Image (cartoon, rainbow, N blue to C red):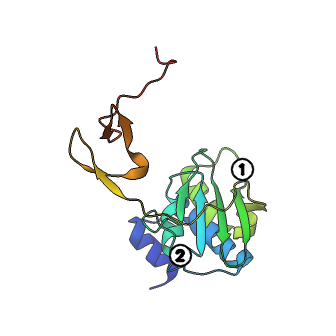
């Protein structure tokens, strides 16, 4: 099975969005001399939660559970890649495609272009995130569900999860 076929298998179908992520991962591999990461050596910050992220997971081993796939939601087809051992990084931003394309023409456009033709490569805007941390957990004293310490709020001496916590915001109408 080819790497593309593995991406399609993971994602569920072939589409232009998956090809965008495939090309971004391929370009990052070339520019940073990286490959699949079993640990947190390779980090991706995606600015969207679209189809392409699935290809990045398959090709580079970035995942939410491992802590090396993070989202900085801007709605842009942009991906920042970092290689911890070398300190090298790159931000890849999808170039605009020609206007007035049919859906089939659009899909073909992404498949017919090289990664260099699809993306502008530039310096990253965000600093390399710290490695993932493991936090203690506490039982919420309202619902009883176990919650990571970084998500607990103290109210009247009680530990509450975010679902049970009633936030205070003076700007809410």
Residue marked by disc 2:
59
Q: Who is closer to the viewer here, 48 or 152?
A: 152
Q: Quadrant of residue 106?
A: bottom right
Above or below residue 88? Residue 167 is: above
Looking at this rendering, what residue extends furthest in the top direction? Answer: 173
Neighbourhood count class around disc 1 (C-alpha, 10 Å): few under 14, some 14–19, many 20 upward: few
| SS class, disc 1 | loop
**Quick one: label 1 or label 2, which is nearer the N terminus?**
2
**Residue closer to the observer: 79 or 7:** 79
Q: Can residue 152 be seen in the rendering of this structure? A: yes
- Where is 7 relative to 133, above or below? below
Counting other residues with Cα less than 10 Å from the Cα at mark 2, is it few (<14), some (14-19), or many (20 or more)? Answer: many
- Dot in front, 1 or 2: 2
Is residue 52 shown to the viewer in this render? Answer: no
Give 117 or 112, whichever is nearer the viewer.
117
Task: Return the x and y of residue 151 as percentages of the image width and height.
Answer: 40, 46
Residue 65 relative to residue 40: left or right: left
The answer to which image quadrant residue 25 occupies is bottom right
Query: Disc 1 marks which residue?
Result: 98
Q: Are marks 1 and 2 in contact (CB under 8 Å)?
A: no
| Residue under the point 50% across and 52% down | 49
The image position of residue 96, as x and y in percent, is 72, 50
Residue 156 rendering spot, x and y as whole percentages: 33, 31
Per the image, label 2 sits on a secondary structure element best described as: helix
Q: Residue furthest front?
A: 157
Q: Residue at x 44, y 24 (%)?
A: 168
Q: Nearer the viewer, residue 77 or 42?
A: 42
């Amino acid at each position: 099975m080819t790497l593309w076929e593995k991406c399609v298998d993971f994602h569920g179908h072939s589409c232009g969005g998956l090809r965008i992520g495939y090309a971004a991962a391929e370009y990052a591999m070339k520019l940073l001399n990286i490959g699949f990461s079993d640990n947190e050596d390779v980090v991706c910050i995606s600015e969207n939660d679209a189809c392409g992220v699935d290809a990045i997971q398959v090709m580079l081993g970035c995942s939410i559970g491992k802590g090396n796939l993070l989202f900085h939601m801007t709605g842009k087809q942009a991906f920042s890649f970092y290689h911890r051992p070398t300190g090298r990084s790159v931000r890849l931003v999808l170039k605009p495609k020609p206007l007035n394309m049919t859906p089939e023409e659009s899909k073909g456009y992404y498949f017919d272009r090289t990664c260099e033709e699809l993306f502008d490569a530039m310096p990253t805007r965000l600093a390399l995130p710290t490695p993932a941390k493991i936090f203690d957990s506490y039982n919420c004293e309202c619902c009883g569900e176990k919650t990571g310490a970084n998500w607990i709020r103290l109210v009247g001496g009680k530990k509450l999860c975010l679902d049970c916590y009633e936030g205070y915001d003076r700007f809410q109408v």
